[in-house]
Amino acid sequence: MRPIGHIESPLQDKLLVPRQPGLAPSLHCRLRLLPEFAREEAWRGIEGFSHLWLLWNSHKTEGWSPTVRPPRLGGNKRVGVFASRSTHRPNPLALSVVKLLAVETDSLLLQGADLLDGTPVFDVKPYLPYSDAVAESVGGYAPEQPELLAVRFDDGAEAWLTTQPVGRRQQIIELLQQDPRPGYRRGAAQPEKTYAAKFAGLDLCWRVDEQGVEVLPPRQPQKS
């Protein structure tokens, strides 16, 4: 298989990637098509669909394991890899449903994607509500969305937000309220520990205390 394009996204660190598509609806990304596939006739009619399936390559994942530890089970209990959506699979393939916002000459503008910047995309298919949405489906050990944390910004972060594009605050809230820390740390206050992850060209910084998530002023990422 070969990619038809790559994702352009402010998500630049695996730690911040939402664990499922659609959990950060304020987050927009772009599927930039390779010239061979940026042909108007190949996309004719796609604007009539509100949502799309993306088949993509989890290119930042190395190796696979027959069992994994889902964050929804606290990061300690193991289940089979095929009973999870972990990216540590025999073939690094993933599937996400996203909202289509606009069709442009060489790209698609998308909403709610859980993909890193630079992710190769293999295929795009229309989402069909009458067959893809199963009303009587059961969610196993993840029957519903996990509890969300309250997110607040300290004075330095508030000052930084005044220099940012409209909507940046909501994007950060949607990403951090899901508690992106490793599963075994979720639910525990760690006011002494600062977390950082690359987002929109900066290191987004935060900590978790008894009140929820406190966003700190971002810093320029260190050169590796």
Image (cartoon, grey):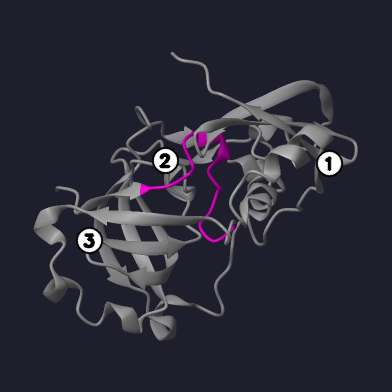
Position of residue 48 measured from the top left corner of the image (x, y, whole percent): 33, 84
Position of residue 201 measured from the top left corner of the image (x, y, whole percent): 49, 34
Other-residue count near label 2 (Cα within 10 Å), few / some / many at <14 / 14–19 / ≥20: many
Other-residue count near label 3 (Cα within 10 Å), few / some / many at <14 / 14–19 / ≥20: some
Asked whether 79 or 179 is in front, the reply is 179
Q: How many labels does the image show?
A: 3
3 or 2: tag closer to the N-terminus:
2
The residue where tag 2 is placed is 87
Q: Residue type at mark 2?
A: Thr
Residue at the left extreme? 36
The residue where tag 3 is placed is 106
**Does residue 215 sit above or below 97 in this rendering?**
above
Query: In front: mark 3 or mark 2?
Result: 3
Residue at the front extreme? 163
Position of residue 100 measured from the top left corner of the image (x, y, whole percent): 40, 70
Query: In front: mark 1 or mark 2?
Result: 1
Q: Which picture quadrant has residue 105?
A: bottom left
Q: Residue type at mark 3?
A: Asp
Query: In front: mark 3 or mark 1?
Result: 3
Highlighted range, magenta: 8-23
Position of residue 175 measured from the top left corner of the image (x, y, whole percent): 63, 47
Q: Is residue 133 left or right of residue 70?
A: left
Q: Helix or strand or loop: what does disc 3 sit on?
A: loop
The residue where tag 1 is placed is 212
C-alpha distance separating marks 1 and 2: 28 Å
C-alpha distance separating marks 3 and 1: 41 Å
**Does residue 195 sit above or below 104 in this rendering?**
above
Is disc 3 in contact with disc 2, using a CB cutoff of under 8 Å? Answer: no
Is disc 1 in contact with disc 2, using a CB cutoff of under 8 Å? Answer: no
Q: Residue type at mark 1?
A: Gly
Magenta span has 82? no
